Image: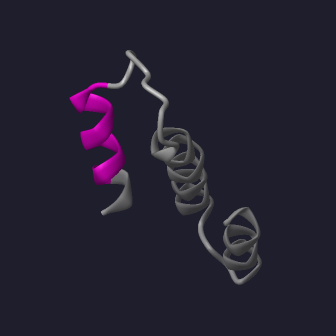
Amino acid sequence: MDSMIGQLVRKGLPKEVEKALDNLRVIGNEAVHPGTIDIKDNANVAFALFRLLN
């Protein structure tokens, strides 16, 4: 995924969008691994990520 974002950057992707995609990639990656529960997770973080994605 990181290399795909890099390709988009080379094609002119705005820095703000690159940062948003990187945040979604990193945070999303941490959230999808089964068997891992993070008590810091909450609805506000989830909604913020959805807003970034949309």
For the point 76% across and 69% down, which residue is it? 3
Does the magenta segment cover residue 50? yes
Does residue 10 appear left or right of residue 21 in this picture? right
| Image quarter of residue 1 | bottom right
Counting from the top left corner in percent of width and height, residue 51 is at 28, 51
* Colouring of the image: one colour
Q: Main secondary structure of the magenta part?
A: helix
Question: Residue pushed farthest bottom?
Answer: 11
Above or below residue 48? Residue 50 is below
Does the magenta segment cover residue 4? no
Number of labels in the image equals 0
Counting from the top left corner in percent of width and height, residue 36 is at 49, 30
For the point 55% across and 56% down, which residue is it? 16
For the point 39% across and 17% down, which residue is it? 40
Q: Which residues are magenta?
A: 42-51
Question: Where does the C terminus fall, quadrant-wise?
Answer: bottom left
Residue in front for this viewpoint, 36 or 20: 36
Above or below residue 6? Residue 22 is above
Does residue 41 appear left or right of residue 20 in this picture? left
Counting from the top left corner in percent of width and height, residue 13 is at 62, 73
Residue in front for this viewpoint, 12 or 44: 44
Question: Residue pushed farthest front?
Answer: 35
For the point 74% across and 78% down, which residue is it? 7
Above or below residue 3? Residue 46 is above
Question: Residue pushed farthest top?
Answer: 39
Counting from the top left corner in percent of width and height, residue 23 is at 55, 46
Does residue 40 appear left or right of residue 2 in this picture? left
